[in-house]
Amino acid sequence: MKPFNNAGFTIIETMLFLGITGLLVVGVLAGAGTSINVQRYRDSVTSLQSILQQQYSDVMNVSNDSPINSCNAATNIARGQSGCVVLGRYITTLNSRRLIMKNVIGVIPASEDATATLNDISVFLGSADGAQPGYNIQVIDTNSQVYDVEWGSSLVDTAINKNVPLKFSMLILRSPVSGAVRTFVAPNATNQEAVIADKDIATLVNQAALKQKISVCVDSNGFFIGGKSAVVITANTTSASGIEALGEVTSGC
C-alpha cells in the first residue's frame, strides 16, 4: 500500500500568505479609521451649526431661571418684580475651540410709549439715566453656556490666513417693539479685534453689523486629509434657517 503524500505549504508560501493577509487587514483598518475620522469631523460641523441655531430658539422662547431678575444684581429683587426683560443672546469666541453664550437683558423704560416710534435698532439702546429712551441692553452671566467644538476641530478664518484662529461676536436680539429678531455680527478683520467685551455690546447694534456675513471655517487639525467645511451666518438673518452648513466644495475654506 502506497503511503499518503501529505504535501503542505512551504515556509515561504506561509510567510507570503501571512504578509498579504496582514497588508489587507491594515488596509481595511486604515480605511475604516479614515471613515470614522471623516464622520467625526462632519459631526463637529453639524454640532456647531445646531448650537448656533439653538440660540434663536432660546431668543424666541425665552426662559429665565435666575432667582434674581434685576438689572442690578446687588438689589436682590425677586424675579418678576424688577424692570428687567430678557431680549436675546450674545455669542462670542473665547478661543478657536470654545464659544461662550450669555443672556442679554434690557431695562423697561419708565414710559414705554417713548419707544413705540423707535426702530428695531435704536430701541435696544438708550442711556443708563433714562434720558434717552431705549432698553439699554446689557449682558449677564446668569444662564451662560459654554460650547467646545467637538472632536478636536477648531475655527479658522481663511479670509486672512488658513491658520489664523477665527474671532467673532454675534448678538441675537428680539425687538420689544415689533417682535422681529435681528442678528448683529462682528467678524474678524485684519488688525481688528472682533471679540466685543460684554460691557460694550451696544457698539455692535448698528446697520453695518446687520449686513455682515461670516463664514466659520472648521479645521480638523490633521484629523483627516481633505477640504474644510463651514458654518455660515448669513447677513441680517432673522431665524435659525439663516445658519447654514456648507461642504468642502462650496465652503470657500
Image (spheres, rainbow, N blue to C red):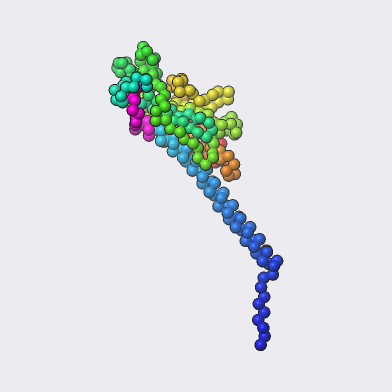
- To which quarter of the image does residue 106 belong? top left
Across and down, in percent, residue 249 comes to: 54, 41
- To which quarter of the image does residue 228 belong? top right
- For the point 38% across and 34% down, the residue is 57
Nearest the camera: 225 or 3?
A: 3
Residue 122: tell me if it is visible: no
Nearest the camera: 25 or 231?
A: 25
Lateral position of residue 145 relative to residue 82, left or right: right
Residue that lies at the very extreme toward the bottom in this rendered image: 1
Query: What secondary structure predominates along the stretch shown in magenta?
Result: loop
Across and down, in percent, residue 8 comes to: 66, 73
- For the point 35% across and 26% down, the residue is 86
- For the point 54% across and 40% down, the residue is 152
Residue 109, placed above or below residue 103: above
Residue 249 part of the magenta-drawn span: no
- For the point 56% across and 31% down, the residue is 165
Residue 156, placed above or below residue 1: above
Across and down, in percent, residue 42 comes to: 50, 43
Q: What span is in magenta? A: 57-70
Total number of numbered discs in the rendering: 0
Residue that lies at the very extreme toward the top in this rendered image: 131
- To which quarter of the image does residue 17 belong? bottom right
Residue 2: tell me if it is visible: yes
Nearest the camera: 166 or 115?
A: 166
Residue that lies at the very extreme toward the right in this rendered image: 12
In what quadrant of the picture does the C terminus appear? Answer: top right
Across and down, in percent, residue 247 comes to: 52, 41
In what quadrant of the picture does the N terminus appear? Answer: bottom right
Residue 58 part of the magenta-drawn span: yes
